[in-house]
Every structure is written in structure tokens, then in C-alpha cells.
Amino acid sequence: MKTQSAIALLVLPLLVTDLSAQLQVYVSKTGSNSNSGTTIGSPFLTLAKARDYIRTQQPLANGAVVNIRGGEYFFTSTLSFSGTQDSGNANGPIIYAAYNGEQVVFSGAGVLDKANFVNLSPVTDAAIYNRIIDVPSRSVVKKVSLAGVDLGAITRRGWGRILSASSFPEDPVFELYIGGKRQ
């Protein structure tokens, strides 16, 4: 019994040492990319800054953990990761995880101003009106102007056109969500 206790006490400090040797990086919606990023009180603002910081700290024998504070993170461009500089290795992985179980959402979506959806006018263009299959719905469908909203490049997609994974950056898929529910 005493032998088992002694072995357990020797192994436990080694595990704690390994975990504490991992580089800890923090990201928060209230952070700043001019912060150090290495304490919870001084987090980076973006994942790109955390990734770039970790790249400057290579090699990382024990890996790193990017602790992402709760919130919704909007991306306007692709965040790319490449090779072991961004993933670490089997003995020292680079892990991106929600801090302490907080809810983190990554979104490439844009948020439309609610003001765009006030005082909507009915659809008056006959070509559009007649395309609405459900006849009773025709009288309640409204139109909204998205003039001035940057939707990126809108190109033809679907309708027999084959889309590949490489075409998605050029061919964004537009979807409407209201109150977090897909419409």
C-alpha cells in the first residue's frame, strides 16, 4: 500500500509539470491585439493574432492551448492554418478550445441592421410576384433593399452548375437566419 502511494505521488507532479509547461494564450471579444495574449486579463482580440503569436514562439515542445472566451466571432476573411506550425505535434499539440466551457460561435455571416426591415413595401414586380408558388403568400411577401450592404461577389450557382470545395470562396452561399433560426 505504501509503495503504490509513493509511485502515485511521483507521477502526479510530472503530469502537473507537463500541463503547466504548455503555452497558454487567451482570446476574447473584449481583448486587443496589442495585448500580450498570455494572461486571461490581457487577451488578444482575434484568433489570427493568437495563431501568429504562437508561430513566433516555435518550437513548442509542450504545445499550446488557445483559450477562447465566450462570444460570437465574425470572420470577414478566411483564417488559415498550415502544417505543424499551427497544429503542433503528437507530444505537443496546439489546441484551440472554449475557455472553461464557455459558449463560442464562429460565423462568416454578416449581421444586417434591423433598420433595413422596418416599413417594408410589398412586392410589386409581376415577374417576382408570379414566381411565389404559394398564392396566399403573395400578398404578405415584402421586399427589402440591401443597397449599401457588402454581400461580396454574387455569382450564378446551382441550377445544374457543379460546385466544388474550391469554388466556395468565390461562390458564397447566402442564407437568412432570424433569431438564430434558419429561414
Image: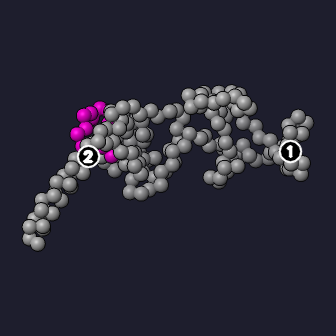
Residue 8's place in the image compared with 93, above or below, is: below
Confirm whether residue 124 shows in the render: no
Confirm whether residue 129 shows in the render: yes
Residue 39 vs residue 181, the one in the foreground? 181
Residue 2 vs residue 106, the one in the foreground? 2
Residue at far bottom of view: 1
Q: Position of residue 176 (x, y in %)?
A: 68, 45
Does the segment drawn in magenta span residue 55? yes
Q: Residues within 10 Å of mark 2 (few under 14, many from 20)?
A: some
Q: Quadrant of residue 167?
A: top right
Determine the secondary structure under disc 2. loop
* Mark linked to residue 84: none
**Quadrant including the N terminus:** bottom left
Amino acid, disc 2: Gln
Amino acid, disc 1: Ile
Q: Position of residue 51 (x, y in %)?
A: 37, 36
Q: Residue at x 42, y 40 (%)?
A: 47
How much space separates mark 1 and mark 2, taking CA atoms? 58 Å
User: Residue at label 1?
Assistant: 133
Region of the chain picked out in magenta, as a range: 53-65
